[in-house]
Image (cartoon, helix red, strand yellow):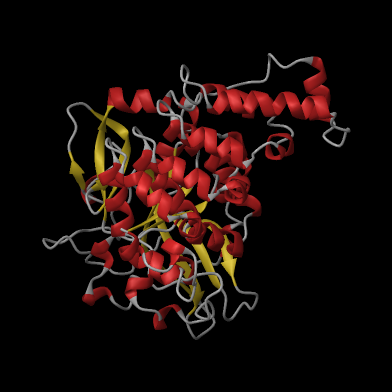
């Protein structure tokens, strides 16, 4: 099973739990080697050689690879990215493989041995969906002499169905006896707006309340070989959320149902013309091709029979030239997607995951208002926008959207609760903004 107690772990040398569920040996790093040193290890070289082969947890080979990763790499760490240019002052981020040590709060009749669901303040998150625990996030830095030290940031790392990596804070890492070793503050996890004057602060000078408890920091494992800290930081700022994090077991039948949402597709049914276009993406794109694609994506996001499969198929068909799809992600597409009462949550999740920048550019007050009126998935879609886009979401809110939520008989109360619960975030992000309705006084708007 992917969640092991200390005695079951493949390497228990530094992972012994005492009666208070705290760590006895506070130096729990697998290694203190720098990222450059790690990249010279054979197991690490093999990891980076193979990582681009895997695309989704729907693939059984991918699941086996990830499930065995903590055991096979129990003596190695995976270098991620570096914050800073100076070797003396840089912080090097690393993934130290391990099984999750978070305690499940929700049982299952026939639990799946690999997957979990994540909860914030005992509230089930819809995104990410199924996850696997694969390790802990460490920060490696020079400790004052010629050596470097790796310390745990307090975050476990989970991988979701599309192989995005999520950092999840373990509150048990806040242990006075282990203060010198964890949780190690890091700039990656700071809840700081990109236009804030706090971006240059030392992490130790920022209050604990400004720390994200969950955030995506890598959109896909496939991106890891060339991923940089600034991109990771921006991804965290878009997806970060605060709240006590816990995990829950998931039944096998439920896991299999959710896995089927992300089928492994090939392009064997592509036409010759499409294959030529994908092979030579610089070819001129006729207006007819774009018009046909615009119609196709509107049909896909409005599909009430196969859910997200039509959209996934469309994306897969043009996977070799994603700029084609990006050209047709418009405010109208987002508006139609959020109004889909049967599969809106799934379709919006696919769009946000595949084309976050295009969805961000296309998010409008009209779409947020339409999401607030979705009687089936209104809360889930609003939460997806809030978690992913933060400030932009609040800028797109309007009194009309609040009124629509109030009149939403099926899930309006859940939407209003979501907005109230995150009002502190809104006030922090929107500070200084005036004359934009809900951006100035959420309480008054309600």
Q: Residue at x 62, y 39 (%)?
A: 52
Q: Is residue 373 left or right of residue 395?
A: left
- Which residue ends up furthest to the left in the rendered image? 19
Q: Is residue 400 left or right of residue 285?
A: left
Can residue 152 be seen here? Answer: no
* Percent x, y of residue 411: 29, 39
The front one of 413 and 147 is 413
Q: Where 292 falls versus 56 (above or below)? A: above
Total number of numbered labels?
Answer: 0
The front one of 174 and 348 is 348
Q: Where 382 falls versus 419 (above or below)? A: above
- Which residue ends up furthest to the right in the rendered image? 284
* Percent x, y of residue 406: 30, 46
- Which residue ends up furthest to the bottom in the rendered image? 144
* Percent x, y of residue 215: 43, 56
Quarter holding the C terminus is bottom left
The front one of 138 and 337 is 337
Q: Residue at x 51, y 33 (%)?
A: 337
Quarter holding the N terminus is top left
Can residue 91 be seen here? Answer: yes
Q: Is residue 117 left or right of residue 68?
A: left
Res 205 → quadrant: bottom left
The front one of 291 and 26 is 291
* Percent x, y of residue 141: 50, 75
Q: Residue at x 17, y 27 (%)?
A: 109
């Amino acid at each position: 099973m992917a969640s092991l107690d200390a005695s079951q772990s493949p390497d228990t040398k530094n992972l012994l739990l005492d009666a208070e569920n705290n760590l006895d040996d506070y130096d729990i790093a697998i290694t203190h080697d720098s990222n450059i040193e790690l990249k010279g290890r054979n197991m690490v070289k093999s990891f980076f050689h193979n990582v681009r082969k895997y695309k989704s947890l729907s693939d059984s080979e991918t699941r086996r690879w990830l499930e065995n990763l903590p055991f096979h790499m129990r003596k190695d760490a995976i270098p991620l990215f570096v914050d800073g240019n100076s070797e003396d002052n840089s912080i090097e981020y690393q993934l130290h493989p391990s099984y999750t040590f978070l305690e499940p709060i929700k049982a299952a009749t026939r639990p799946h041995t690999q997957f979990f669901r994540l909860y914030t303040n005992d509230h089930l998150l819809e995104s990410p969906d199924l996850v696997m625990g694969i390790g802990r996030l460490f920060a490696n830095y020079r400790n004052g002499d010629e050596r470097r030290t790796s310390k745990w940031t307090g975050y476990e790392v989970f991988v979701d169905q599309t192989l995005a990596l999520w950092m999840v804070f373990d509150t048990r890492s806040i242990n006075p006896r282990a203060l010198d070793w964890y949780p190690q503050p890091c700039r990656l996890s700071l809840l700081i707006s990109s236009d804030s004057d706090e971006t240059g602060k030392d992490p130790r000078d920022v209050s604990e309340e400004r720390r994200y408890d969950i955030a995506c920091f890598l959109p896909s494992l496939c991106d890891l070989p060339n991923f940089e800290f600034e991109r990771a930081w921006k991804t965290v700022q878009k997806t970060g959320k605060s709240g006590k994090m816990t995990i829950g077991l998931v039944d096998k039948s439920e896991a299999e149902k959710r896995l089927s949402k992300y089928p492994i597709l090939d392009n064997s049914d592509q036409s010759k013309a499409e294959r030529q276009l994908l092979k030579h993406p610089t070819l001129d794109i006729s207006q007819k091709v774009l018009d046909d694609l615009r119609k196709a994506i509107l049909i896909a996001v409005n599909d009430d029979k196969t859910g997200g499969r039509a959209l996934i198929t469309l994306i897969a068909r043009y996977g070799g030239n994603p700029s084609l799809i990006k050209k047709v992600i418009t405010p109208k597409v987002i508006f139609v997607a959020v109004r889909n009462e049967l599969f809106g949550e799934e379709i919006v999740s696919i769009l946000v995951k595949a084309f976050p920048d295009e969805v961000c550019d296309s998010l409008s007050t009209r779409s947020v208002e339409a999401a607030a009126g979705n009687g089936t998935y209104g809360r889930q879609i609003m939460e997806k926008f809030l978690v992913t886009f933060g400030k932009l979401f609040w800028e797109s809110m309007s009194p009309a959207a609040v009124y629509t939520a109030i009149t939403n008989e099926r899930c309006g109360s859940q939407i209003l609760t979501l907005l109230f619960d995150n009002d502190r975030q809104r006030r922090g992000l929107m500070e200084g903004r005036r004359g934009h309705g809900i951006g100035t006084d959420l309480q008054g708007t309600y």
